[in-house]
Image: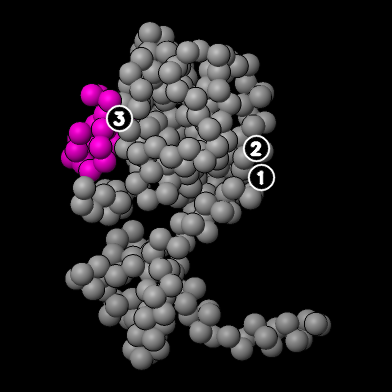
Amino acid sequence: MDEGETGGAAQSVPALRRAVAILDHLAECGEPISAARLTKALGLPKSTAHGLLLVLVELDLVARSPEGLLRPGPRSLRWSNAFLAQSDLVEAFRRQVAADEHLSDHSVTLSVLDGADVVYLACRNGAAPLGITFRIGMRLSAPFTATGKAMFAAMTEADVRRAFPSRWPDPLTPRSVASLDAFLKELEATRQRGHSVDDGQVRLGMACVGAAVRDAQGLPVAGVALSFLEAEASAAVLDRFGNRLRAIAEALSRSLGWRG
């Protein structure tokens, strides 16, 4: 196919372009919006927008609340996770971890959000007896993990609330954050600190620090965490490890096009 044919084919699918414009706008809004607001913002005919939204909702690319408000649907997250798993991010993570001799004795992980859980994409388990072995594909409730806290801290409060519309996850330990309101307070402390802290919320006796990895738009797409014995977790150690994890997360973010 020559250049002229390619250009003609690209111009012959306006519905696809409009559907992508809808998804982009919903992603950029940061909050659910009405169909009327969406239609006006994009300058779409009402009948065209209605038809496209019916299909996008059917395909889980757009989610509609009981009040009729629209937001990005769960299928886009599956695509995002697949992109990360197949991209150079995992290899870049491994290179970053291998190059940092200060982290050689500790467990380091890379994970992504999947709903209210984190799923681990890469792990390097250290020698310390943490009582848990991280595995690729392992899932944990995100609010209790350092990576989950870091990724949610990079979101708006509205986005965090939408991730937990009803039941709060069952605690993993007596220290697991007990409610959404308590979790929101933790996230504000994470933002002020610059890194997240899991103080025995996943496993008693284990402490973790984490940081978010961002894409070119600055949105959190993954998280990195360092796990170690809680007995080591002095304020100075938490700050030192937190700074190291933040540096790794920023390097990985730049590999995805982030320029913050």
177 inside magenta stretch: yes
Could you say whether the residue bearing mark 1 is in a helix, strand or loop?
Answer: loop
Rendered residue at 37%/79% (across/down): 53
Inspect this view and state whether residue 97 appears. yes
Q: Residues within 10 Å of mark 1 (few under 14, many from 20)?
A: some
Residue 159, percent across and down? 31, 53
Per the rendering, the mark at residue 88 is 1
Identify the residue at horizontal 47%, vertical 77% (top origin): 19
Residue 150 visible in this rendered orientation of the protein: no
Q: Residue 258, how many percent across, how many down?
A: 55, 47
Vertical side of 240 occupied by 169: above or below: below
Q: Position of residue 8 (x, y in %)?
A: 69, 88
| Marks 2 and 1 in Cβ contact (< 8 Å) | yes
Element marked by disc 2: helix
What residue is disc 2 on?
A: 92
Please check the rendered image and state whether residue 149 is part of the magenta-colored stretch, yes or no.
no
Give the residues in magenta. Answer: 168-190
